[in-house]
Amino acid sequence: MQSIPRLTQPALPDFCNLGVILRILLLVNTMLAALALAQSRPFTLAGWMSNLFSGAAFVEPVLISSLVVLCPFRVVLRRYSYWVSVALIVVTEFLITVCLHLLLRGEGLGFDLELVVHDWLVVTMICGVVLYYFYLRERAFSPALAEARLQALQARIRPHFLFNSLTAVLSLIRSQPQQAERTLEDLADLFRVLLREERRAVRLEEEIDLCKRYLAIESLRLGERLCVDWLVDPDALGATIPPLILQPLAENAVHHGIEPNPEPGLILISVARKGRLVEIQIINPRVEGNTQPAGRAGNQMALDNVRERLALHYDVEARLEAGPGVDALTGAGEYRVKITLPMHEQEAPRVERRA
């Protein structure tokens, strides 16, 4: 079987990401424990603990110092190619090793260049194992798997959505030609985003704009049955997020909370910044007898897809929670989807909008 070629260069892990930090700590300390076990022959608990503490006395200061330095240094590393960044990390580890040895001189251990080179080579090998682990992890999730899941999500646009949208436009051409033109522009913009090959992060403001265009098209078909209330914190609009996070969830809200209900229904979409976090919440009515999401495979697929892509981009720093609830004021059933993700404000290219 022929393997799928890589379309993009590997990327370094985000050394400020909590999940990345925990994985590095676990991986390095596991290697340290395994090395101490290999040195303890015949095995005794006291001998293994002695070797473990002896190794930790050298490894842990270098490990903690590396994480502290590489977290802010990642901004510089992103400017270069993968292998140049790896070379810069190796140089950084050498400088950290030298600095730690200079600090230890005050304790009477002295400065030995051969010992520095030895320790640096050990640190370099550990770095190589850690970076190779994250390289394999990236290969496992992207681009082939992530692209396939993203394309599956894009293909979820229901055929009758396009048919109903065009039918609504045809009914407006003579009576409201300007409205028909705006709807066609919204439809074109929506499908342009859904079908583009670019997988860059986008500003949350762009995602909200795309979601509003989608809901504007659906409102032509559903009329007064579809009511949407937006609560958007302006401080959160600069956050960058993976593309196609809001639109699939808004589509689920329409498909499961508005379409089956003959009465008007309200979809509440709130976006708020809470410190270094962004919280996005989508609430739609829960129709009696509609066991969302387990009762509808399409809804579950979208939730799983969004959850997996959040994990791919943010690791353990983002989460998606979904489940039924009850409106505190009316007592009516509702369904809530809540996304919490870190507030990343890297510059993302803005998409030009039509006037």
Image (cartoon, rainbow, N blue to C red):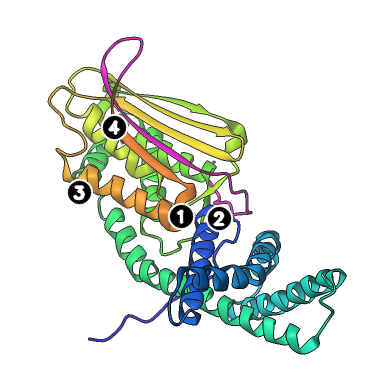
Q: Which residue is mark 3?
A: 159
| Amino acid bearing label 1 | Asp
**Dot in front, 1 or 3:** 1
Circles 4 and 3 in contact, beta carbons < 8 Å: no
Q: CA distance from mark 1 to mark 2?
A: 8 Å
Circles 1 and 2 in contact, beta carbons < 8 Å: yes
Q: Which residue is mark 4?
A: 323
- Dot 1, how many residues are within 10 Å of its Cα: few (below 14), some (14-19), or many (20+)? some
Point out residue 161 in the picture as x, y percentages from the top left corner.
Answer: 23, 43
Q: Main secondary structure of the magenta part?
A: loop
| Amino acid bearing label 4 | Gly
Name the N-terminal-most of marks 4 and 2.
Answer: 2
Q: CA distance from mark 4 to mark 2?
A: 27 Å
- Tag 2's secondary structure? loop
Residue at image coords 23%, 25%: 286
Q: Which residue is mark 2?
A: 17
| Amino acid bearing label 2 | Asn
